[in-house]
Amino acid sequence: MKHIKCPDFPTGGYLLNSEELIEAYATGRGRLIMRAKTHFETLKNGKTLIVITELPYQVNKAAMLEKILLITQEKKLLFSGVADIRDESDRSGMRAVIELKKDAEAEQILNYLFKYSDLQCTFGVNIVAIADGRPQQMGLKALISHYISHQRDVVTRRTKYELENAQKREHILLGLMIAKRNLDEVIALIRKSKTPKAAREGLIEKFGLSELQAQAILDLRLARLTNLEMLAIEKEYNEVLALIVRLKAILASEKKLMALIRSELLEIKQKHNVPRRTTLINAESEIQVDETALKVVEDVVVTFFEGLRARRVALRNANGSLEEQPLFSIETSTDKSFRLFTDRGACLTLPVESLNETKPAARPNNLAALLPFEEGERIVAAFIEDDEGEYIFITSSGYVKRSLASEYASRNKRVAAINLKEGALVLSVAKCVEDSLLLITKDGMSIRFLLESVPVMGRIASGVKCIKLEAGDNVLAAMQVKDEGEILCISDRGYAKRSLLFDYELQGRNGKGVKTFDFKKNGSNGTRLVKAFYVREPFEFVLSRRHGEKQSFSTEQVRIEPRLSKGAVLALVMLDDDIVDAVKVTG
């Protein structure tokens, strides 16, 4: 490597003096690591510029700058110090500039660019040549050795060919010299010959020439019979004799043969003697980036929407109005993770930092692209990852399960959260915070029981049956309740009522429960409940009709009635445009 330092690329740049380069030279297989040629400039305002003047081979400048822009957006944490990216190339040459903020670590950011962009590229080396009649992989020394051997063979064959031609020419020139010494006789013989053949045979017989020499004399033009031309022939003859001596000496001496090869290689070197463009430098090829050490914990608000969507907004920007009602909105920080529970009985782990930060009105992140959700799966609960306390699961089939939160600590993106009975879905998941649980079914039944009657079970247990359901009925709502408050029930025909929690007495789990809504036989006040809420403080909610119309109400607009009453009209329903859902307004 003292003599052949490294390959030279037309675009210049730096080549790293690495073990891979040495291995490529030694074995013929390895890799070359190229870097763009860069330097730093400082502006008057204190900002630093990373200036790129040469690129690695085959790197397109426009594509490279576009990729740098993309990674600065994707890896905002690493490239937060980048202020601007621009192309300042002109007739004088290439110049791409990355402008940094005042407090940015220029060396560090440049190292990140080497790691993540095309400012550093790798080229595979695979030196294969035909040697001894077959393709072989070989190192640089072996390649040069085979090349010299090949050149020895080529130059030897070429020298033999030149010697053969020189000897032929010497033979012809010798004949012409004989003709010169006997010019008058030669001319007389040719003049008296009847045919060229007779003249040729006469010359051969009289002067002892070969047929080739005789033909050369006959082919000689009259102009060459002048004294000057004859002197030129004699001079050429002497030169050819000297050439023959030199060619024979080359063939007879290995040393002279190698000297000739060397001189020819030096001629090639002189002919193509252009300055080296690629510079060999000593530098670490592997850029170590400890991203965790660079993480800045930021307070954010994560809002989840139907359709497996979530939006992460910086806490300072989280006061904007939302275009649609969210499932839930949670204040957290970027070093946390969520546990997402789904209606299919799964628990998925979502790191907050995996969500791209957006503006309040921007399109939310697609969670299906980040986590392995099943088709049609819905999120029913989201909690900041915490191993303290217990989770309580309620299923549509009336099963309830308590499990320790620590059961759901997992490195896997998706784990089973509960073993569901056939056809059942998870209705809700909550942290255990109260003493009693109230279940309400779509057919207007309810049961209130102590949570302590539900045993703590493992992560994949099914739970215990907590209400006996009639055929076709299922649990609609579940709420942890205290000793005060109201239960708001809304039917599909727009009837609603509030009942005092006092009317819902505690009983043992897995009973039939008691009625919480009395449906008329003609169904004028509804045939099923669409929603039930636990009300401790007034709030607003939105009713959704089958044909898409939405209407807002306050809990204060709903009358308080006995538990067994039939409710009163809250929203007038015409024909089949019944109520399909009610959503509590949050925020």
Image (tube, rainbow, N blue to C red):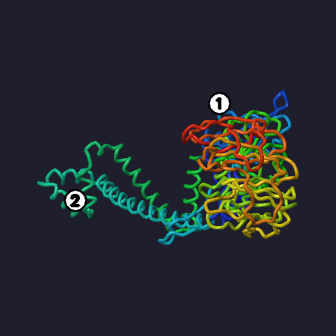
Q: Is residue 255 above or below residue 16?
A: below
Instruction: Label 2, secondary structure: give it.
Output: helix
Left or right, 150 with respect to 203, comes to: right
Q: Secondary structure at mark 1?
A: loop
Answer above or below: position of 307 versus 91. Answer: below
Extreme residue toward the top, this view: 44
Residue 6 percent location from the top left of the image: 67, 55
Classify mark 1: residues with Cα within 10 Å, few (<14), some (14-19) or many (20+).
few
Q: Is residue 9 above or below residue 154?
A: above
Q: Quadrant of residue 32?
A: bottom right
- If the image is split into quadrants, where does the C terminus sit? top right
- Displayed quadrant of residue 173: bottom left
Q: Amino acid at mark 1?
A: Ser
The residue under label 2 is 203
Lateral position of residue 134 relative to residue 577, left or right: left
In x, y percent, where is residue 202? 18, 60
> In screen coordinates, is 225 left or right of 271?
left
Q: Position of residue 76 (x, y in %)?
A: 76, 43
Which residue is label 1 attached to? 92
The earlier-in-sequence mark between 1 and 2 is 1
Q: Nearer the viewer, residue 138 or 530?
A: 530
Q: Tell me the CA gap for discs 1 and 2.
A: 74 Å
